Image (cartoon, coloured by chain):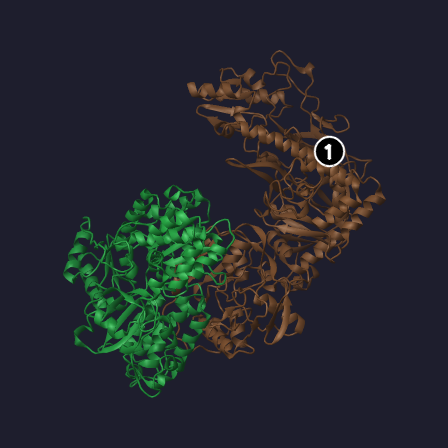
Chain colours: A brown, B green
Amino acid sequence: MSSQNLVRLTIDGKEVAVPPTKTAYDPQFKTHVEIPTTIYDAALEWSRQNNEPNPIPILCHREHVNPVAVCRVCVVDIGGRVLAPACYRPVEEGMQVRTSATSERVRDSVKTLLQLLVADQPPLNRSHHDGNELVALAQRFQVDNSPFPPPARERGRDDSSIVIAVDHDACILCDRCIRGCNEIRHNHVLGRMGKGYSARIAFDLDAPMGESSCVACGECMISCPTGALTFRRPVHADPWQGIQPPPEQVSAQVLARHPLFEGVSEQFLEWNQGSVVRRHFKKGEIICREGEFGYSAFYIEKGSVDIFIQSPLKHVKKSASKFNWGPFGLIRRFASSLVGRNEDQREEEGESRFIHIDAPVSLNYDNPVSTLGEGDIFGEMTCMSHYPRSATVRAATDCVVLEMLRNVLYILQRNKASRALLDQRYRERALDSHLRSVRIFSELLKDESRFNQFVEFLRGKDEKGDDRVELLRLPPGEVIFRQGDAADHFYLVRIGFVKVSQARPGGEDVLTYLGPGSYFGEIGLMSHIPEIRELAPPGVRIATCTALDHVDLVRINGETFYQVLEKFPEIKEQLIKVAVEHLHENEEKRNQVETVPLSEFLSQGLMNAQSLLVLDLERCTRCDECTKACADAHDGVTRLVREGLRFDKFLVASSCRSCLDPYCMVGCPVGSIRRRNSREIIIEDWCIGCGKCAENCPYGNINMHPFEQLVPDPIDPNRKIAVVQQKATMCDLCADLPDQQPSCVYACPHDAAFRMSGAEFRRRVETE
Amino acid sequence: MIIQELNAIQKRYGYLPAEELRALAMRINVPLHRIHEVASFYPLYHLKEPPIVDVKICRDMACHLHGSANLRGNLEGYGHELDEKQIRVEGVSCLGQCDHPVAVSINDCVYWGKTEDQLRSLIRVAYQREPLPRQQADRSPLGWKIDVYGGQPNYDAVRKFVADRDADGVIKALEIAGLRGMGGAGFPTFRKWSAVRGATSDEKYVVCNADESEPGTFKDRELLRRTPHLVIEGIIMAGLVTGAKKGWIYIRHEYHDELEAFEDALQQAQEMGVCGDHILGSDLSFPIDIFVSPGGYIQGEESALLEAMEDRRGEPRNKPPYPVFSGLYGKPTVINNVETLAWVPGILKNGGEWYRDSGTNGATGMRFVSISGDVNKPGVFEVPFGQTVRELLELAGGVRGRQALKAIAPSGPSGGFLPAKIPANQLPKGFIEAKSLPADRDFDILDLTLDLPTLASLESMLGAAFVVYGQQRDMVEQALNCVEFFRNESCGKCVPCRLGSQKLVDMIGEMLARRFDRSRLNAVEEVSTAMSITSICGLGQVASNPMTSVLKYFKEDLNRYFSAAVAGHSR
């Protein structure tokens, strides 16, 4: 924060100066906004400066949520007829604030408010302290009983959830659970219902909690200041069942003293008892395997691990040998359809030298092995967003790791101290590897010392003393910036996926999904540069970027970015070149999109198809000859495994249609599926066969092929190991066969399979 | 969108079936809790299928004084005999028919001034699922001064503005007139308009607050029905002067006749081209739309009203920011009461001085007052500011049944009660000085001039409701009635109002049951103070006024309940 324009005010006679605004999260627009600094914020600063406890009590307010000012215990006297809520009222120059420490009016009011709240608490709740913030406040203000009558009737309990118990009588409607559920977790289950004295919290349409859409994340429980929401039993019965040897349970008390968990509420850890285990691995043991679906992340306490990709780095080659084409098309086999990059350099393929994995390092294509050590965390992306493991991890020495479930990782990412620890680790260790893996940097800075200069520059602090590189964690759906916003930062994607879209008449057009190793935001910052000036509006974002899942971004402020351009002209040149290419592509695409009438646009996938495979389901006897033929044409594995789109009595199987919104690209843990410049989808060599893209493709056009392979052990190149390797591939309509007749059509004995263009097909549907 | 959708669903099914709400959530892509929060907040909506006959009897102030509690008991008994399950009789907050008590709504059809027998036969009609006859109020103009066009839709001010675009002139006239908000707060109108006019924003709005729901207040009802064109012209002028994009009228759903009269007038105005696109063929545009309130007194609080318009629970916002800076959709917004806007055409036609100089006894301006309670001729009267209580009582035909006057409520329940005689030692210094009264003489309330500064110096309030209490009334019991109203209408957002209003009701209830010890009066005072200085909005801030005025002025009534008081309270 700059020291200019500070607002000066006094609190209980002592002066304090604070900036007029602060950054906060706006849950409605899912973006960060500048909001006024409040009296309570100023009181925090005041308390730091004077080394005195904060004189303003709070109950419904917490620093990490937006204020609602409903409990009113934070009221202060600022000279008006009525008192002002400190958590909400913006600071003003010259404001004279009197808190309960100096104002009798304030003290009496707060006392009365506490008496009102205490009067309605169930008798047991009134004295029971144990984390009950209301009781603690009542004690602080010496409210030991209430002069007000108790409630005439009980509001009742909700014990329908197996994990969280709801006691409506203890609820003070502070709104903290509601904000936790909706604004922090985005689960959108909890709300207030009814009105006045009979208002209470409710799940969905006032469903019992256990029957509601609640996912039992526990945020409401840890938000509750009065014990109206309490845990019934530890959440996870035994997530570690079947692991041998049984992992060592780590108690909440032990975790609370662990440096990684500093500042995490013990109540939370207690509730999540069993969600963190300590595991011991002997040298050579596998910790996790690529392609497996996991639910946990790992933190290395002792020792080191090798992290590598075991799959053969090869892609499925589409063009088959022409000699194999026989008259009946039934005895066709490919010797092997997997080819490596050295044998088959594909058109338009860049020389990506790095593979992004779910760890603070990236792997080199030529030698996909790296090492992680003490203090490193890996598997975050798998844990947060349920992606398959991106690499295999094996103990390089005997080692000790903490394995944790999503709830715990989530709280670590939100907890200041843990974040600081992980962020520092990133800057020290991962930044180098991360920058190397960003093509634009690694390719240009081939000179190692020059590259080190670059890393050191970014690792440092800027003139204001702030870190040049800032790590941001965003929840799914948060808008990073909108098209038309002023451009201020440059971003690198570390974990997760970012959707890049542009507004167009009638909706939005997804330009691309950016995964780990990508960067964005440079065009808006470079619009003063002549080459770009011609193509982009000045100083504003040309597209909207939104976090698609849990995203970690590296943010570099505009000032630093300009310094990079200045100090590293080779980067500048390349950035411009790529930006110009992108802008031209966008322009072309926009023209293309604009000329397609809306109705056709909606069915574009079909209308643009040159060659659709159509099955007439009325004639089809389900004899399965087509599937067999497909299998024979494709290395013994059928690609005709799913139903396609159905129109009337027709089933349409089609090859990849290069969707406008290529959802298949989302979630690839190693980023091996991507768009070529021609918008065609390509699957890179380092596909680990996890099947995520096949699962994501809404048209069933991606299938998984197992291939048996003998490959060199990446750890010990002298050994060869046998693996059955899955690789993704797509229905190609047998386009590579000489007569371009799909085998399935050819094989159909009932004349139920056809091949036709999109327009032909439409005529057919309309006439029949 | 949510509220309009809920209205449509309720219209189709008579209530809001859960499956429909689920479908709605999917359709408009909002979480279920968002829909339920709104649907469960507003009294208009039924979450369960309502019975065949849904009878609601007003329980507030004038209707209370005219035996609505008895009537309710009787009709409940009657409904019970007829069909226990399919006839529901319950209380409802003020329906705005205080001049014809008791007001009753049957299946959302409002009736006033009906005898118990008439109501019984209406219940029978409804029970047989036959159409209910509608009671319709007269729309004809009454020759009021405010009606400067004699009931005709002249729109002279709009015509003049389209020709000369003199926004400053309009604001100046309002400033000279000294026109203040007639909804109760009395904020100078020209300041609101010039603040919004001066605000830089891509969008601005005008909202006419026609959510008249304060017990004893029904003057906007008459203005909306008899002079809707004046209200429309006021809205248009606010829009043109401030450069607003759109105008709204937010009207309570129980005002069926008024809504119809306004709709008719608005259609006429649109046909004349004085609102909508290209006003009178010019480049000026200002459309007006109607928003029917899903119900609740709190919606009359301007920021709660905006919340309702934005599809949320109608809970007041924390202020600042005020609506003139951040109102509807966060944009600068003029929110004016019906009457405030209705005075605008007259002021612009006759000049600010015309309005300013029509006050009396040193006060400026005119106003409409709704008189109800223990008077012979309750109704709405156009009066100058500064008229005395005596003059008002004369207008309303004097106290009912030849009783002596016991108390008045000069602002409905909000301002508390003033006694017929204020003892000299109870008169605030500022009041004695302002009125240059002898320091040792009791003040006869009949001499009280009714204008904003005088009432403020008396530490009371001046609203549009003037409720009269005769000698027979027990003011503790009346205080309970008023505090119950606030309790019933509290939105529940903030602690002092939500809990304080309930605890006050409980404690006054104990008092009436002679179970309240005098030593606990402290608690009544403490909670009243806390409510008045820590509540978010005006409702909570005034909710304790009826009781504190009883503590201050009606000790005799109070003492009756302590003669046999038992110490301690059940705990």
Image vertical order of residue A190 relative to residue A254, above or below: above
**Residue at image coords 76%, 26%:** A343
Residue ranking furthest to the top: A327
Residue B180 seen by the camera:
no
Q: Quadrant of residue A153?
A: bottom left
Image vertical order of residue A241 relative to residue A152, above or below: above
Residue carrying label 1: A312
| In-front residue for pair A253/B197 | B197
**Residue at image coords 51%, 77%:** A107
Residue A201 in percent (x, y) is at: 44, 59
* Left or right: residue A753 compared with residue B212: right
Residue B155 in percent (x, y) is at: 33, 50
Image vertical order of residue A365 relative to residue B93, above or below: above
Q: Quadrant of residue A264?
A: bottom right
Residue A10 in percent (x, y) is at: 60, 73
* Left or right: residue A206 compared with residue A483: left
Q: Amino acid at mark 1?
A: Pro
| In-front residue for pair A715/A551 | A551
| In-front residue for pair A587/A367 | A587
Dot 1: within a 10 Å radius of its alpha carbon, few (fewer than 14), some, or many (20 or more) residues? many
Chain label for disc 1: A
Q: Quadrant of the C terminus of chain B?
A: bottom left
